[in-house]
Image (cartoon, rainbow, N blue to C red):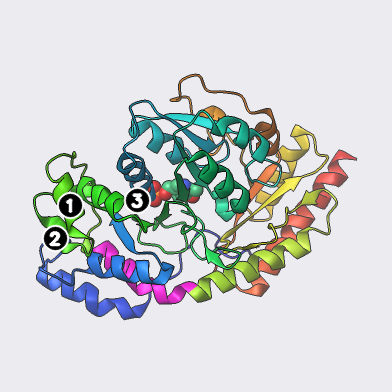
Amino acid sequence: MTMPDMHAAEPLPDSLRDEVERLLATGDLFRYTADEGAPVSLLEQEFAAMMGSAYALAVSSCSAALFLSLKALDLPDGAPVLIPGFTFAAVPSAVVHAGCQPVLCEVGANYRIDLEDFEAKLGSVRAVIISHMRGHTSDMDRIMELCDAAAVPVIEDAAHSLGTTWHGRKIGTLGRIGCFSFQSYKMVNAGEGGILITDDADLVARAIIMSGAYEHNWKKHPVLHDAFARHQNKLPLYNLRLGNLSAALVRAQLPELPRRVRDGLRNHDLVAGIISASPQIDVPSPLPPEVRAPDSIQFNLVGLSDADVDAFVAQSAQRGIKVQVFGQSADNARAFWNWQFIEDLPDLPQTRRMLTRACDVRLPVHLTPEDCTRVADAILSAMEATQRAAA
Ligand SMILES: *Cc1c(COP(=O)(O)O)cnc(C)c1O
């Protein structure tokens, strides 16, 4: 049985060839060269309109967007910032980069934030980053209620949640700021890139200046201009801008998003339905208000020893499926114990337990239902072989 290529990207739309040709012919690659209509500015307008947000700022990565969000909140030096114990290492890294202190909270077996631990730790922090890790949405009703009551600003790390909704509202628009990624493994692939959205004019003005809108380049942003006058020359310039070529790649893919979201969910649910037949495989359900936009699947191995887990990974590999168990693969950047750049790294026993049994398999949205059925059958067959060997 031959497996589909689970790492190949979808070809970029032909529609962008003329724009790329124009950029090559003119060399107009810097966002602030043109007086108006630069691809980065157009992307910001289109993305903000698509999300229903007042403002957008395109930057070099989602990590840069998270960093600028924290800086724009003007937190005191060393401010504690609450993040989930299950996320990508870039998140605590952005916190450290912003001169803040990451505070980790427990995550449950369903990959979502443990609200009891969250509430217990919320009182001691100045900001919260909700990482919707692998596009799994935590209980945002309760989280926003708690954070609003405590007057703690929420940054949504929606790097993997473009297209996800919660009660029909777009993820990334629930908190004060939403951050997205255009890195190749996300829904929109520009190689690298990111964007932040917010309705807060003063906050975005600060982020725009710090992203590298030096001198009066902020005049090219459609934002209340009195906010800029207040901050001119008072903020450092970190130069985390996006270039026009990357913006052109992103813009051409935005019309593809509804299809990608639809196919990603179809692929995920198809595979989830098949592999759930195994009593050793548990695919956690979405929360009721959540409609997901997955490009991968996560599931927990139930009742397997560490040796069985390794055997299942090996059996899957033999069948052409790369299964990554977050907490069993060496140096995994999503296992919190590898974030050793954090001072006084805590232990999170519940998150650790989840990570040692949670599997991650890429399911690119361009896979066909037939591809997905083959992938799911191979996972089931790998589990049966693992069980036979263990018996
Ligand atoms: C990919 C990812 C990031 C980092 O995005 P970059 O654009 O590569 O900086 C942050 N958080 C999550 C949850 C991610 O999946």
- 2 to the left or right of 365: right
What range of the chain is rendered magenta? 245-257
Residue depicted at 73% across the width and 46% down the height: 300
Q: Residue at x 79, y 58 (%)?
A: 276
For label 3, the SS is loop
Where residue 78 sits, quadrant-wise, is top left
Q: Which of marks 2 and 1 precedes in the sequence? A: 2
* Tag nearer the camera, 1 or 2: 1
Is 9 left, or right, of 136 in this rendering?
A: left
Q: Nearer the viewer, residue 173 or 23?
A: 173
Q: Residue furthest right?
A: 391
Q: Label 1 crowding class (10 Å Cα cut-off): few <14, some 14-19, many 20+?
A: many
> Which residue corresponds to mark 2?
219
Q: Pinpoint residue 162: horizontal percent, then vertical percent.
A: 48, 62
Q: Is residue 208 visible?
A: yes
Mark 3 is on which residue type? Ser
- Which of 325 and 219 lies nearest the eye of the viewer? 219
- Per the model, the C-alpha gap separating discs 1 and 2 is 9 Å
Label 1, on which residue? Answer: 228
Q: Which residue is at a point 52% across and 71% down the rendered structure image?
A: 260
User: Is 95 contained in the magenta span?
Assistant: no
Amino acid marked by disc 1: Phe
Q: Quadrant of residue 115?
A: top right
> Does 318 sit above or below residue 74?
below
Q: Is mark 3 within 8 Å of ligand 1?
A: yes
Q: Residue at x 31, y 44 (%)?
A: 68
Q: Residue furthest front?
A: 149
Q: x%, y% of residue 168?
A: 58, 68
Contact between labelled residues 2 and 1, with CB atoms less than 8 Å apart: yes
- Compared across the picture, whether 229 is left or right of 54 comes to left
